[in-house]
Image (cartoon, rainbow, N blue to C red):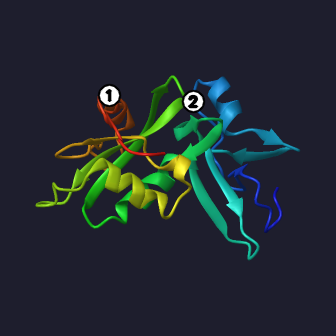
Amino acid sequence: MREPGDDEIAWTARRGRVPLGYLGDQKKTEATFPVVGGERFAVPGDRATAAADGTIRMLGRDSMVVNTGGEKVFVEEVEKALLRHPSVADVLVVGRPSQRFGQEVVAIVQTRAGEEGVSPRELRAFAAKSIARFKAPRAIAFCDVIGRHPTGKPNYEWARKVAESATPVAGPE
């Protein structure tokens, strides 16, 4: 357990009334519902920090982290930054292979109707105003509609395919 104000990134976990596990999948059960000190926990894969006032700041799913240049980037943080732009209606962020950085951050952007004039460079600069510059997308692809599952959850598999052909953002680093 982390103490409030500890800025170290940690796993979120729940104890008490949690599922017993996955039917017929012992390996996945042990990974997601470990027993620690005789008590079962649910560890869904989310990462967070504990603020000094005791609130928990959710960072995102560990499985969706982009490792770029030795730094970890939570895609949800980049998505939130880009969604603040008035021309952006929806966005998904993923990583793609990069010779220079190992992976690079790529944004798939759906603009609002009539807002087709926004440039990739403008969006990168906008994002870099509220998040660290290394987290801002190095490539951007525009689409008519963001791929989502029928439940409304992001379709990151679709986004990774689109990211393969995203245009690198031109301009000085």
Residue 22, can we see it?
A: yes
Percent across and percent down for residue 5 are 79, 68
Percent across and percent down for residue 141 are 28, 40
From the viewer's perspective, tell me whether residue 108 is left or right of residue 137: left
Judged from this view, the residue extending furthest toward the front is 172
Q: Which mark is residue 23?
A: 2
Q: Quadrant of residue 100?
A: top right
Q: Which residue is mark 1?
A: 161
Judged from this view, the residue extending furthest toward the left is 114
> Depth check: 30 or 139 in front?
139
Above or below, 150 against 53 in this view is above
From the viewer's perspective, tell me whether residue 33 is left or right of residue 161: right
Above or below, 149 against 86 in this view is above
**Mark 2, secondary structure of its residue:** loop
Look at the numbered discs 1 and 2 and tell me whether their residues touch, using CB distance below 8 Å. Answer: no
Whichever of labels 1 and 2 marks the residue nearer the N terminus, that label is 2
Q: Nearer the viewer, mark 1 or mark 2?
A: 1
Residue at 65% over, 32% down: 29
